[in-house]
Amino acid sequence: MLSLQRQYRIEDFAPLCRDADLDSFREATADAFLVHRGLVRRLVVPQRQWQLTRSAQRIDVVPALAGGALVYPIKGKGVARRRRPGAWFATVGRADENEIVLPDLSVSMFHAVFRRGPRWQYLVSDAGSRNGTFVSGQPAPESEQGPGREVEPGVELRFGNMRLTFVLAAQLYRMARALAT
């Protein structure tokens, strides 16, 4: 079982895949994930809120691991994930209150929302962010304009300048299992 955190490396899932089948893996982690390769422009926030001034901010560019990838589980809130799809949601943004925290300066504090559609498909909509949310290069609609754009496995999502690939648990399980052997 993995500890509760918001960001992992693919390698972190390998021990779990060695001992678990796909259903156990999905139950212990999530049904879907965002995978990021590349650089993340990270904001270093001061210890106290009153210190947050423009001069107090510092940008670190960190690699998303040498040769590896950062993995963000999509775990939502709302009614149990298998009962009512319309009640399930997961927020994306830079603020710690989001279910998916992306530490990049181009990502708004509250950037986007994932929902589950009536066929249990994943939908993403923009939350009025400054730099937009894109699915395969096409802008996602804003939250108040409807349920969102459907997200297929393997598609590229962009939140601000941060590009991630949407994968289902089975895909991540296969990648991590290959590392475990």
Image: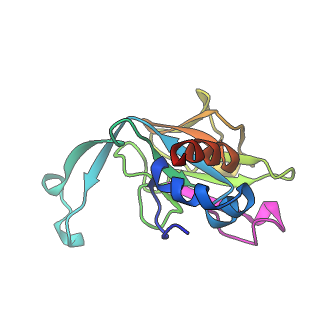
Is residue 154 located in the magenta-colored stretch of the structure?
no
Give left or right: position of 2 versus 122: left
**Percent position (x, y) of residue 2?**
51, 67
Outermost residue toward the front? 181
76 lies left or right of 43: right
Q: Nearer the viewer, residue 134 or 19?
A: 19
Which residue appears farthest toward the top when viewing the image? 137
Inspect the magenta stretch and tell me whether residue 82 lies in it. yes
The magenta-colored residue range is 74-92
Q: Which residue is at a point 69% across and 55% down the rendered structure image?
A: 31
Q: Can you give x and y, in whole percent of width and height, for residue 179 in the image?
A: 51, 44
Image position of 61 (left or right of 181) = left
Residue depicted at x 67% and y 50%: 169
Residue 151: image location, x then y, percent: 70, 40
Q: Quarter of the image holding residue 20?
A: bottom right
Q: Residue furthest left?
A: 55
Q: Nearer the viewer, residue 10 or 100?
A: 10
Give 49 or 144, whichever is nearer the viewer.
49
**Front residue of 55 and 136:** 136
Task: Determine the main secondary structure of the stretch shown in magenta.
Answer: loop
Res. 74 visible in picture = no
In this image, 10 relative to 29: left or right? left
Rendered-image quadrant of the C terminus: top right
